[in-house]
Image (cartoon, helix red, strand yellow):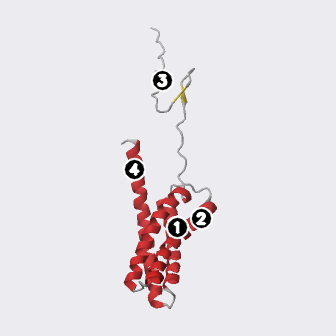
Amino acid sequence: MGQGSSGLHRLTHEIAKFGAVGAFGMVVNFAVSNALWHLTSLQAVRANVIATVVAIACNYIGFRYFTYRDRDKTDRTREMILFLAFSAIGLVIENGILFAAIYGFGWDSAIERNVFKFLGIGIATLFRFWSYRTWVFRALPVAEPKAETRAGQEPVAADEPVPAPAPPARPRQRV
């Protein structure tokens, strides 16, 4: 398998894992928002912001310990600050679309709320995928292959064949 197809395989695997965590977060998000919409007197967008924050907390755990568990863990403070910053932008995208639907167009039935919530989550997810993989959960640097040296020669690249050493000479037996 070539280098390009290996990279495509890794990206596909990453998208699948990101999607699994995101799907769980979306279930949490919809469950909390619909519960708040039907069981409280909170305004729709405020209730949705709370639901989004709960989903973001669940997603961080899934992304850190499932999707991106193999990524750099050296600076968790930086990671958390960037995660929260990009998540906040995603929250604004998601809730901005819901706000526009409700207050801009008057689309405020339970079905309309959920349709525009879904649309907002979809657009925000594209942004989150790009930002999390690019800035938050950074890939560890790829180790460069070390050059090997042959006795008395210049270093040789690791992908260049190195001849096997000659077998040791057997001592002669006296008769």
Secondary structure under tag 3 reads loop
Are the two marked residues, 1 and 2, in contact with CB atoms closer than 8 angstroms? yes
**Where in the figure is residue 168, as x and y percent of width and height?**
48, 20
Name the N-terminal-most of marks 3 and 2. 2
Gap between marks 1 and 2 measured at Cα: 9 Å
The residue singled out by tag 2 in the image is 80
Q: Is residue 170 above or below residue 65?
A: above
Gap between marks 4 and 1 measured at Cα: 24 Å
Q: Is residue 66 above or below residue 44?
A: above
- Residue 16 marker: none
Name the N-terminal-most of marks 3 and 4. 4
Are the two marked residues, 2 and 4, in contact with CB atoms closer than 8 angstroms? no
The residue singled out by tag 4 in the image is 8
Residue at x 44%, y 89% (from the top left corner): 38
Q: Amino acid at mark 4?
A: Leu
**Where in the figure is residue 41, as x and y percent of width and height?**
50, 91
Name the N-terminal-most of marks 2 and 4. 4
Name the N-terminal-most of marks 3 and 1. 1
Gap between marks 2 and 4 measured at Cα: 28 Å
Gap between marks 3 and 1 measured at Cα: 51 Å
Residue at x 55%, y 47% (from the top left corner): 141
Q: Amino acid at mark 2?
A: Met
Q: Amino acid at mark 3?
A: Pro
User: Callout 4: few (<14), some (14-19), or many (20+) C-alpha neighbours within 10 Å?
Assistant: few
- Residue 60 marker: 1
Secondary structure under tag 2 reads helix
Residue 68 visible in this rendered orientation of the protein: no
Secondary structure under tag 4 reads helix
Q: Which mark is in front, 4 or 1? A: 4
